[in-house]
Amino acid sequence: MSEGIIIKNLVKSFRKDVILDNVSLKIEPEKIYGLLGRNGAGKSTLMNIIADRKFSNSGSITLNGSTIHDNDENLSKVYLTSEIDVYPDKFKIKDLFHWVSDIYKDFNNDLCKKLSDEFKLNLNSKFGNLSTGYNSIVKIIVALCVPADYIFLDEPILGLDAKNRDVFYNALIQTYSDRPRTFVISTHIIEEIANIISNVIVIKNSKILIDDSTENILASSYAVTGPASQVDEYTDGLNIVGSEALGKIKSNYIFGELNDKPIPDTVTISNIDLQKLFVNLTDKE
Amino acid sequence: MMHLKLKNYLIHSYINITFWVFFYFLLLFWILPIVLRIFTGNFSFGDVFTGISPDFITISLGISLIINTLFNNTNFRFAISNGISRKSYWKTRTLLLCGFVLIIEIVSFALMLIEKPYVFKSGNNFIPYNLYGDVSLYSYFHNPILNFFMAFLLSILLTLSSTFFFMALNNFYLMFTKKVRRILIFVIVALVFAIPFMIGFIIAYLQYVGGNNLIFSLGKFILSIFGINVVKQGLYFNPFLFAFDMLIVDLILATLSYKFNSKIQIYKD
């Protein structure tokens, strides 16, 4: 049984700025993760270090018990696509696909052709001449077709229109059901991936704030709504992550267990979505 | 283990660069002079053949080697992003560039054998001061075949040293972020101009401290390390010592390029 990627006490700093502060994490096989965090939280840095593109100051990253750093066998199981362009600008898209498939012997050429058609990608275009959207599309296609077991997608839908985002999500679900493997998706459009991801990792202030299944997280997230005084009275002592008020009506957002107090008739309790929870969690200092 | 798949990609990249260098050389040194002669009315059919010389081929191959050694950033990013380790990348690249060096040397020496085979004639390792030219540089032994192979070996070691030097320089440069790289270019260019002056100052200082005798002794000592012994009428050249020293230099530069390569990170350019 595969152990997955285990990250222990990872620290990355750049001069005086601490980007990742003692991060420990386990990325399990065959799961779809949402890696969430505000701008500059350290998501991209974490992905880059896992994929051995950048180095950490300390800590360890192992895949199935052996290190990823400078290990050909493990590196071939990890693939990262990010905003950093790693393909030569002069390459035609068809050449780019050719050379990637030349390196990965089990590259899914059929899926590559199918997705190129679905995204209406011109294979004779040069990579450097692509728009932001098509630049993302090319990277998405490569990421979905490489035979790696751990795919990291950093802002995969950057510049994609609604139709192409839909094509991407469908392709992701299809390719996952055809060959289950781990996807770690970092995006700011949480509502669009909320139904796809099975696990959520939230990074805040360079540390891991939440690392749990989407199901558990949503089951522990509540909105307590009603008259302000009664809402405050009921939620007193709970983990309030945020609140909103409209006139005399107030909503307190709770993350964690509710108490055994009787619920006042004027107060309603409902679950909140991932986006709302994330906004409130990361907004709170 | 050598990453066979990456080998294909790198060979394609190196051949591509070599082709374009060769193409521009053809344009500049062969086609352009012919066109100029046609326009000036001085063209004769024989000019078609005089443009291409063995030097043209070897120099263009040498420049291709330097470009292939220095223009490494794109290939490195492509390799590392596609599951190739830094170690494997360095090994593959080094093996291919060594192969490139071997091809250049074979072509160069084959052309030399055709054009001026006399340079490998019987001789000895004494180079008189008043004799300047190919003959003195390739006649180490009394056997022309031995001369040929020793010259071939020395040439390979010398070309390898420049290849590893440029690899190390390039890998050192790529270790830094874009901002630092700009400063580095400035420093390297400044050093290229400053080093001759620095050497001049050192020599002047040594002259001041110990006079010409000290300079002469130091010069003799440094040359003797590389197998060149200065005598009154000329130089005695020990090709074995020179080859051994160059091998050490090559190993040091290769190690440096490997160490620097293992420290390169992928930055947003």
Image: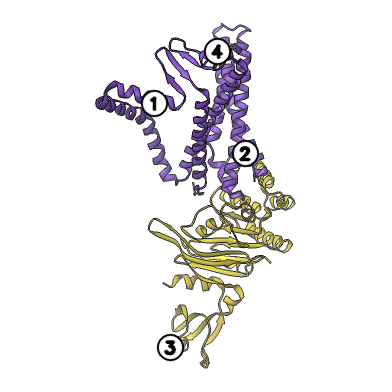
Colour of chain A as rendered: yellow
Above or below, B40 relative to B220? above
Q: Amino acid type of disc 1?
A: Phe
Q: Residue at x 27, y 23 (%)?
A: B211
Task: Describe the element under mark 4 as helix, strand or loop.
Answer: loop
Report the chain holding disc 4.
B
Colour of chain B as rendered: purple
Q: Nearer the viewer, mark 4 or mark 3?
A: 4
User: Real-space Cα distance between discs 3 and 1?
Assistant: 93 Å
Q: Residues within 10 Å of mark 4 (few under 14, many from 20)?
A: some
Report the chain holding disc 1.
B
Contact between marks 2 and 1 (CB within 8 A): the answer is no
Q: Amino acid type of disc 4?
A: Gly
Q: Quadrant of residue B75?
A: top right
User: Real-space Cα distance between discs 4 and 3?
Assistant: 107 Å
Q: Amino acid type of disc 3?
A: Ser
User: Real-space Cα distance between discs 4 and 2?
Assistant: 42 Å
Report the chain holding disc 3.
A
User: Real-space Cα distance between discs 2 and 1?
Assistant: 42 Å
Q: Position of residue B86 (x, y in %)?
A: 56, 47
Q: Amino acid type of disc 2?
A: Leu
- Visible residue check, residue A256: yes
Residue at image mark 4: B123
Task: Indicate which disc residue B10 carries.
Answer: 2
Q: Nearer the viewer, mark 4 or mark 2?
A: 4
Q: Residues within 10 Å of mark 1 (few under 14, many from 20)?
A: some
Q: Residue at x 56, y 34 (%)?
A: B68
Q: Position of residue A50 (x, y in %)?
A: 55, 58
Q: Residue at x 56, y 24 (%)?
A: B60
